Amino acid sequence: MDIRYPLAQRTAQIEPFHVMELTKRAAALEAAGRPVIHLNIGEPDFTAPEPVVAALERAARAGHTQYTTATGLAALREAIACDYGERYGLDIAPSRIVVTAGASAALSLACCALVDPGAAVLMTDPGYPCNRHFVTAFDGVPQPVAVGPETRFQLTRALLESHWHAGTRGVLVASPANPTGTSIPFDELGRIVEAARARGGFAIVDEIYLGLSYDDAPRSALAHGDDLVVTNSFSKYFHMTGWRLGWLVVPEALAPVFEKLAQNLYICASTLAQHAAIACFDSASLSEYESRRNEFRRRRDYIVPALRNAGLPVPVTPDGAFYAWADCSAHSDDSWQFALELLERIHVSVVPGKDFGHHDPSRYLRLSYANSMDRLQEAIARIERYLPGRERPRS
């Protein structure tokens, strides 16, 4: 049918996930019997532990399927607040917590509340692509800041100060970050927040991977002040990606505004998922999560030096999440074509830099180590066998 009405102009500014083309090709290869190893998937290979699944079943059988309040179950908000106290030593009032339909809904709410049409929001390039699209969806202007190994692919106060202009209204950072797995040093994060604050701007901090920190005891940005907006999720550390559950911590004075927006935009997060998530904070569940975090660290400690030895150096060792941002420039001038080559020739699926921004996208690949150790070892073995004898394509 011929569509005669126009689409909203913002739709043209939101790019597709280019890697989905590679994902479809990987699926086709698997359907043809090829043994593809997936190092492209940005979700844990673990699932929710038994206490959480049991809590879901109890809630479903008890008929807990009606709407909750827009900000979420009181018991879940209290459990999250308690976890901030026990894990990070922070006194966070449950009234500041807004339970959302995943971190994506949390960031959408934050942008809806804080981003006016035409307002610019600073963020890193490379960075998680949806962050810039959340800003665009509310007619704001993503303001990418090119970052590299010298700043651990993260924003600094100096970079913020040099890029802030009259149209800038705030900053959105992630620590640890996708695709690099790197964190902002805690003191530097405080300086970034203070610089935004001094300019009358907001600071949104995405902490979805904070629980998956490996080298130092993680510290939440909330320690830097009550005026921050911080997002988190049950997807990564709690291994519940498809459950679509996350949360925001907002300034007390803004809680009614966020509640009003949530009421109108999605009513509430999944009631069953909320009831189940309370069990995430049981001692048995937390013990399992910590065991799994240690397993992710073991994989990190294997794959980063293994990639370097195989000829795909990782310029900055990731200290969180489950990604390695590897430099493939010794083998190709185009990471997209190189990723396709690895998929077709040795059946290893990785993500080219193209999806994560416009600063050196052809130089880097993202590899996820959210896969079993034996699969990671097999992937490295295939890469080691393939690269030495490979003839580099001409540009």
Image: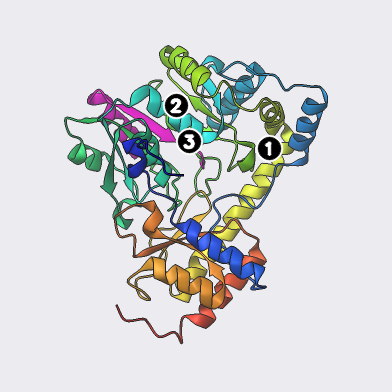
Q: Nearer the viewer, residue 186 or 334?
A: 334
Residue 26: percent from left, percent from top: 57, 65
Magenta region: 187-209
> Is residue 217 covered in magenta?
no
Q: Secondary structure at mark 3?
A: loop
Identify the amino acid type marked 1.
Answer: Leu
The answer to whether residue 228 is visible is no
Q: Secondary structure at mark 2?
A: helix
Which of the marked residues, 2 or 3, is nearer the chain's N terminus?
2
Q: Is residue 61 left or right of residue 316?
A: right
How far apart marks 1 and 2 lie (CA) works out to 28 Å
The reply to whether discs 1 and 2 touch (Cβ–Cβ < 8 Å) is: no
The reply to whether discs 3 and 1 touch (Cβ–Cβ < 8 Å) is: no
Rendered view: 330 above or below 189: below
Looking at the rendered structure, which numbered label has been put on residue 109?
2
Of badges 2 and 3, nearer the viewer stands: 2
Residue 326: percent from left, percent from top: 42, 64
The answer to whether residue 28 is visible is yes
Locate residue 169: give its quadrant.
Answer: top left
Q: Residues within 10 Å of mark 3 (few under 14, many from 20)?
A: some
Q: Residues within 10 Å of mark 2 (few under 14, many from 20)?
A: many
**Which residue is pictured at 44% across the width and 32% down the height?**
107
Residue 379: percent from left, percent from top: 58, 71
Of badges 1 and 2, nearer the viewer stands: 2
Which of the marked residues, 3 or 1, is nearer the chain's N terminus?
3
Q: Residues within 10 Å of mark 1 (few under 14, many from 20)?
A: some
Identify the amino acid type marked 2.
Answer: Leu
How far apart marks 3 and 1 lie (CA) works out to 18 Å
Looking at the rendered structure, which numbered label has been put on residue 286?
1
Which of the marked residues, 1 or 2, is nearer the chain's N terminus?
2
Locate residue 337: give its quadrant.
Answer: bottom left
